[in-house]
Structure formats: C-alpha cells, structure tokens
Image: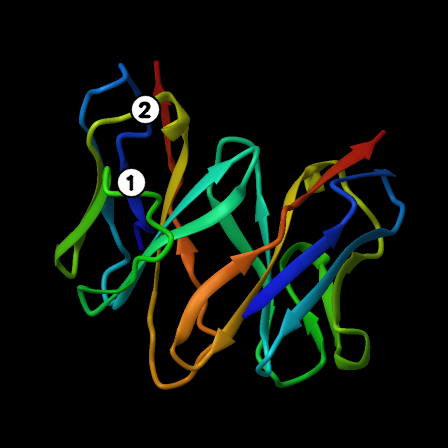
Amino acid sequence: AQSVTQLGSHVSVSEGALVLLRCNYSSSVPPYLFWYVQYPNQGLQLLLKYTSAATLVKGINGFEAEFKKSETSFHLTKPSAHMSDAAEYFCAVSGGGSARQLTFGSGTQLTVLP
Amino acid sequence: DAGVIQSPRHEVTEMGQEVTLRCKPISGHNSLFWYRQTMMRGLELLIYFNNNVPIDDSGMPEDRFSAKMPNASFSTLKIQPSEPRDSAVYFCASSWTSGRAGETQYFGPGTRLLVL
C-alpha cells in the first residue's frame, strides 16, 4: 500500500521568495512520485515526476523536486515565486508494476503575495 | 492533441435522477481512470480501465455507481439514482501503459456535479 502526506494545507509566500512544498511518501515498493498542479476550475497538470532515474527532477515553470529515500520525501521547490504560481499542488505516488493508479496527497494551496 | 475531453463540464440535477458523465481519452492511450474530488475526501480513484477492461473498481462508492468503456475512445460514469452526497468534481484521466511503470496520467478538465 502507498500513501502520501503533504505537510501544510496552505502555504503563503511573497513574490520572489522561495517556494517549498513538502511531501512525504510511504510505499512498500520502489515508488514513482509525481507533482501535479491544479489551477482554479481546471484539471490537474503534471509538473514533474520521479521514475528512479536522477534524484533531482526538473519540471515545468521552474519547479524542481528532490527524491530522498532516507527521508522518504519528495519536496517541491522553486527559487523565486511568481504570482502565476498561485494554485493547488498535489503530490502523488504510484507503486509501479500492476499498480498503475495514483494515490494523491490532500493538496497544498499556494498563495503568492505581492 | 485535443487532450482528454469530458462532458458535460457542469451538471445540476435533482436527487434521484440518473447522471451520465462522459470521457474521451487521448488517442492512443490504453488506460483510463475516473477520479472524484471533494473537499472532505480529496482526490479518490473510482475505477481504472486498461485496454477497455475494468482492472480495479474498488474505489466505486456503491452500486449506484457504474462505469463502462465500450471502446478505446469513450467511457461513461453513471450514477443512478443520484444523491446530494455525490456532488463533487469528477475527473477522467488517460495514459499510455507499457511494460514500464511511472507513466504520466493526463487529466481532463472535470465535470462539476451538483445534486440538489
């Protein structure tokens, strides 16, 4: 069984500040990890994913995440927040093999302050 | 590519009525997923098809919910009879599933369902 915990349901940062959204996972098999973003009234869009290649994964819109097995973490970062980054962010885990389905975290709403 | 297409985008119905949600996956994808999003429960997988065959329907809430995928380009999620607690956003997603895992799921825009 897999699960994801996102610490902080709401995060506020100032424009230009560092964005850090936390995600910890639990998986009985080597995990595949994803970050999705959801803008208001839209579907989910993939930001980046970890599939056991490089532990530092770069995604779209300047986001990146680092897989740390020892900490069972996959935190999402962006060096400088932009107003357009305001959205809800979801971390998800897939167990691979026949378990194709994604298990999502509860989401983190990011607010960017001017 | 047109992406995953869902219809209708919004649905308002009365308790007891039948509701049918529709999804057209991305052409060439062989896996399709139905999710439900609510404030209380977040994003939940309802059912997952691979090559038009239901693989895992353990997330379907109860017998009032049913899903079909008659061909590779169309799927429906039906609720009969609908209840107010079914009010949610329903997402369809598709992916290309090969021997390797970790494939990306592409989400549609969702159907906002309100049951009065």
Residue A87 image point, x, y percent? 65, 39
Residue B57 image point, x, y percent? 30, 57
Element class at badge 2: loop
Return the residue at label 2. Answer: B83
Between discs 2 and 1, the one toward the N terminus:
1
Residue extending furthest toward the left: B70
Subunit ID for the residue under disc 2: B
CA neighbours of label 1 inside 10 A, class few (<14), some (14 to 19), many (20+): many
Amino acid under disc 1: Gln
Image quadrant where one finds the C terminus of chain A:
top right
Return the residue at label 1. Answer: B6
Residue B30 image point, x, y percent? 25, 68
User: Looking at the image, is B85 positioned above or below residue B36?
Assistant: above
Amino acid under disc 2: Glu
B62, A3: nearer the viewer:
B62
A57, A94: nearer the viewer:
A94
Residue A91 lies left or right of residue B65; in this view the side is: right
